[in-house]
Each structure stands twice: as structure tokens, then as C-alpha cells.
Amino acid sequence: MIKPLLTALLLMTSTAAMANDDADVVGRYRLVNQMEAAAELSLKQDHTFQWGMIVGSADLKANGTWSVNDGVLEIKTPERPALTGSPEFVPFTDDDMKRIRQVPSNFWQVVVAVKGVGGVADIAVVVETRDHKQYQATTELNGLATVFKDDGEQLARVGLRWINDSADYTWFDVPERQVAKKTAAFWVTDPQWAAKQPFERLEFTVENDLLISTSDNMTYQKIPSR
């Protein structure tokens, strides 16, 4: 009788300690030891997280679930859905283009995004000039592909397909408004194409109000609650 009772008490104590550990890490954290980047991590009580980082011109975002085990915090993003073929591309309207800022004169950019969700990564891009010269690029996590150009070259058309698609590119003539802004921009209607995240899994050592990455020592400090 005594042994089962002790086992039950130990289990209850372990469960309570785990709950306390989880409750202790809930909150918002800010990256504190990197001059080149700004980042914030929010750990919610329902064991979901939101993460964002701005580094250079890249605005990265991730979400998923978190857990704590033996003083180590693990955050994981969901797997990207299985993709085949290429998405359907819909050119921005003139009204859509009002949100696009003018880019410097020495390059073009191609934007591929899901409206209200985010950029579409891993889209292979071919930019063709009016002189039929071609440049290749691939969209990054923010949905942008950048192509540096020679002086005087004019943007004519753009070919798009997913990088793992063996089919031909889908080609679009670039409207004059987009030519003037040096930006060809397209919507993708299926949100699963915007599901790629900057990482699959990260681990942090929990030290009081600090989270220290086990891979690169990036340190996040808890933001005091108001």
C-alpha cells in the first residue's frame, strides 16, 4: 500500500514541477545580443508560439508549438504540406501595385505572395528583357526574387514555376505600371504554398529570464509584463 502511494506522490510532484516549468517560460522574449537583427519570440499558454525576425531587408516569421524538458525549450514548426506541380499565378492589379514601393534603378524584383498570408518561397523565376536577354532567380522566404540588371535594360516578361516542377514556365507580359516600378508581382490563391517557414526546430537553454539558443548562442530576454 505504501509503495503505490509513494509512486503516485512522485508522479504528482513531477507533473506539478513540469507545469511550473511551462508556466515560468510563458511570455514574450526579445533578441538581445545581435546588432544586425531584431527578433521577438512569444510563448503562449496553449503551447503555441509566434516568432519574427528582421535582418537586412528580410522580414521572417514562424509559428508552431513549444515544449520544455529538463530545462531545454524546443520550438517546432509544422511540416510543409506536400506540393506538386506549380501554383496558379495571378498578376497584381494596378490597385495592388499601389502597395509596392519603387526599387533602386539597378535591379528588378519579382514578388510572389498569398494575399493576407505571406510570401511564397522556392518559385523559380526567369526575367526576360525587351532584347530577349534572360536572368534567373528564386523567390526567398519573403516571396521576393531580386535580379540585378544592366543600365538601359527594359523589363518585358516573366516566367514562373515551382523549383521542383519539371513543366514549362508560365509566362506573363509585364504591364507598363509594373515596368515603371521595376517590379513584377503575382498572387497565389492557394495558401498552402506560403506554408514554408524559416526553420523546422530550434532549442534553447532556459536560464532564469533568458533563452539561449543551443546552436548559435542567440539570446532572448523575457520582456517584463505590464
Image: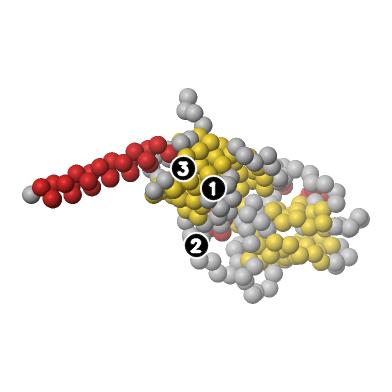
What is the C-alpha distance between the residues marked 1 and 3? 9 Å
Residue with the mark numbered 2: 81
| Residue 84 point in image, percent of width and height | 55, 69
Left or right of 142 on screen, residue 204: left
Res. 213 mark: 1
Residue hosting label 3: 206
Amino acid marked by disc 2: Pro
Horizontal relation, residue 126 to residue 166: left or right: right
Give the farthest residue toward the top: 226
Residue at position x 56%, y 53% in the image = 215
The disc, 2 or 1, on the residue closer to the chain's N-terminal end is 2
Residue occupying the point 34% across, 38% down: 20
Q: CA distance from mark 3 to mark 2?
A: 31 Å
Quarter of image, res 83: bottom right
Indicate the secondary structure of the residue bearing disc 3: strand
Q: Which mark is residue 192?
A: none
Disc 2 vs disc 1: which is toward the camera? 1
Residue count near mark 3 (Cα–Cα under 10 Å), binned few <14, some 14–19, many ≥20: many
Q: CA distance from mark 2 to mark 1?
A: 27 Å
x, y percentage for residue 159? 72, 65
Q: Amino acid at mark 3?
A: Val
Q: Secondary structure at mark 1?
A: strand
Q: Counting other residues with Cα less than 10 Å from the Cα at mark 1, is it few (<14), some (14-19), or many (20 or more)? A: some
